[in-house]
């Protein structure tokens, strides 16, 4: 999705001013990009119409940065399409809160039941109980018990002979008696939507009157995810959606369609196999991600608040001209350390959020201090011309900064690599971006 849009933006961004024909061309790219991302064609049609009307209705064509304006509109409308605001989780006024996980086989119900319990304990101080109402495969009960053990939550189960409706009811009763204020019921799934499954789920629903019925769906199934969501909602009445395996789906098209097709909000997303890999769903962040800008807009806002704008423009120019040197590096380090943890900032840079391992990145403030010490041990000449850093100079710097030679080498290598990358970014796909930073 992003490549197409970025391409269109770059073209227009260079023009400064755009005509109605340019806008049309851009809308065509937006349409194609959304269709490629597997967004439902009806949703796309309405969406493009809306963006177009807004763009024509406002003074986009007259503005000095039309491409950014259009991107902003696209971003806002994408956010709107996904519900605008983050939807709150529905807790019962009379505990326990009862949650039913529903969905097809392999969607991630059992895993997500554990993730959700984990999240609710950490963030909402809840005391969860898990209920094993998927009685068709012994492995399903084992799986939930393993998760329960891992997280130290009780799992209510009665083996494979028991009736799922009875299990659900008894689990709620058990929670009441043992002071558990959240019951998460893991239910069975099938490969396809079928009568039998729906009847069973309806019976459980009638018996325990859940506060949340969370339809869990694999984001990688694209259009199919939307159809299945529609069927579950029509037949069972869901309260929300959990989109799993978003770590594997970079297009995110289903996130866009599901909300507008079912009218039900996405409440959480699954981002990996670990029990910590769950996040509340924020429509605005998802919109930026779909636009391929990471949380670029947030980053820009933050940058504009905390970052001296003139400096930012200077930096952008230097990056483009490839004259970014160690003095700038130090400057930037100082600026950036006022903006919040580096690892958060890294994730907001376009493309970076999809890098494998980016979640593991931890930047120790101590490392920053060491890097700074190394740079400060360079002569002004060396800082301006990193190319002259010979081995003997590096040895001197290592001594001066009380760091090892390996560390000095590593840091210079990193500097050169990031310089290369920044330069590429500023020239390539993200041509429009440094303009955004500047104004
Ligand atoms: P269920 O049949 O609906 O209960 O699905 P499971 O919870 O058993 O999950 C099926 C598979 O998907 C398992 O291998 C999970 O580890 C995996 N899975 C679930 N959620 C995610 C996710 O968010 N990301 C990734 N990468 N894998 C997931
Ligand atoms: Mg399961």
Image (cartoon, rainbow, N blue to C red):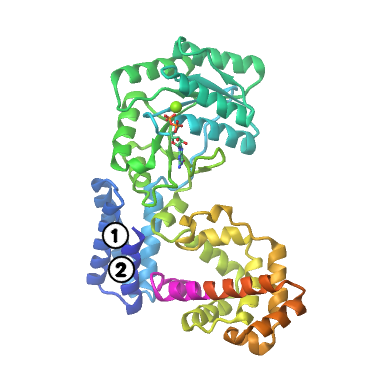
Identify the residue at image location x=65%, y=33%: 125
Q: Magenta stretch containing residue 97, yes or no?
A: no
**Which percent across, then down, holds residue 124?**
62, 35
Q: Main secondary structure of the magenta part?
A: helix
- Which residue position is annotated with label 2? 8
Specify the quadrant of the image occupied by residue 410: bottom right
Q: Is residue 114 left or right of residue 403?
A: left
Query: At numbered mark 2, what does the secondary structure look like: helix, strand or loop?
Result: helix
In this view, the residue farthest toward the front is 391
| Residue 128 % position (x, y) | 60, 26
Q: Which mark is residue 30?
A: 1
Front residue of this view, candidates 148 and 36? 148
Q: First in sequence, mark 1 or 2: give its number.
A: 2
- Please determine whether, in this image, residue 320 is positioned above or below residue 135: below
Ligand 1 located in image quadrant: top left
Q: Quadrant of residue 302?
A: bottom right
* One can see residue 92 in this view: no
Residue at 30% in and 68% down: 8
| Residue drawn at 54 percent across, 16 percent down | 157
Q: Which residues are magenta?
A: 419-439
Residue 311 position within the rendered picture, expressed as x and y whole percent measured from the top left: 58, 79
| Left or right position of 205 against 358 | left
Spatial CA distance of label 1 from label 2 is: 9 Å
- Residue 144: where, in percent of width, then height? 52, 25
In the rendered image, which quarter contains the N terminus? bottom left
What secondary structure is marked by label 1?
helix
Q: Are marks 1 and 2 in contact (CB under 8 Å)?
A: yes
Q: Residue at x 59, y 34 (%)?
A: 118
Q: Tell me if mark 2 has few (under 14), some (14-19) or many (20+) residues whose alpha carbon lies within 10 angstroms of its own.
A: many
Residue 421's disc number: none
């Amino acid at each position: 999705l992003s490549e197409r849009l970025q391409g269109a933006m770059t073209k227009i961004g260079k023009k400064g001013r755009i005509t109605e024909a340019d806008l049309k061309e851009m809308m065509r790219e937006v349409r194609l990009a959304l269709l490629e991302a597997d967004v439902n064609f009806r949703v796309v049609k309405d969406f493009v119409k809306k963006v177009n009307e807004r763009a024509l209705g406002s003074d986009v064509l007259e503005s000095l940065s039309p491409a950014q304006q259009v991107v902003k509109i696209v971003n806002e409308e994408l956010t709107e399409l996904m519900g605008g605001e983050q939807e709150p989780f529905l807790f019962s006024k009379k505990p326990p809160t009862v949650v039913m996980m529903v969905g097809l086989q392999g969607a991630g119900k059992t895993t997500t039941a554990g993730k959700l319990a984990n999240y609710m304990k950490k963030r909402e101080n809840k005391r969860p109980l898990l209920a094993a109402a998927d009685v068709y495969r012994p492995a399903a009960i084992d799986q939930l018990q393993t998760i329960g053990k891992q997280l130290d939550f009780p799992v209510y189960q009665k083996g494979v002979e028991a009736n799922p409706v009875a299990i659900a009811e008894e689990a709620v009763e058990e929670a009441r008696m043992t002071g558990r204020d959240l019951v998460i019921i893991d239910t069975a799934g099938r490969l396809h939507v079928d009568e039998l499954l729906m009847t069973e789920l309806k019976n459980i629903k009638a018996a325990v009157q859940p506060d949340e019925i969370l339809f869990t769906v694999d984001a990688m199934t694209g259009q199919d995810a939307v159809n299945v969501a529609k069927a579950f909602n029509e037949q069972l009445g869901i309260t929300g959606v959990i989109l799993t395996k978003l770590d594997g789906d970079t297009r995110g098209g289903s996130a866009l369609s599901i909300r507008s097709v079912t009218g039900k909000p996405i409440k959480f997303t699954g981002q990996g196999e670990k029990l910590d890999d769950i996040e509340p769903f924020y429509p605005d962040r998802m919109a930026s991600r779909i636009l391929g800008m990471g949380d670029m807009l947030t980053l820009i806002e933050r940058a504009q608040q905390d970052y001296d704008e003139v400096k930012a423009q200077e930096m952008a120019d230097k990056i483009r001209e490839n004259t970014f040197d160690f003095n700038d590096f130090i400057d930037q380090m100082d600026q950036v350390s006022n903006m919040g943890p580096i690892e958060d900032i890294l994730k907001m840079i376009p493309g970076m959020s999809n890098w494998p391992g980016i979640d593991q990145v931890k930047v120790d403030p101590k490392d920053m201090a060491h890097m700074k010490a190394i740079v400060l041990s360079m002569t002004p000449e060396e800082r301006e011309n990193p190319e002259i850093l010979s081995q003997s100079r590096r040895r001197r710097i290592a001594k001066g900064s009380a760091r090892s030679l390996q560390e000095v080498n590593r840091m210079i290598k990193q500097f050169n690599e990031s310089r290369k990358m920044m330069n590429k970014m500023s020239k390539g796909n993200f041509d429009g971006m440094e303009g955004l930073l500047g104004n």
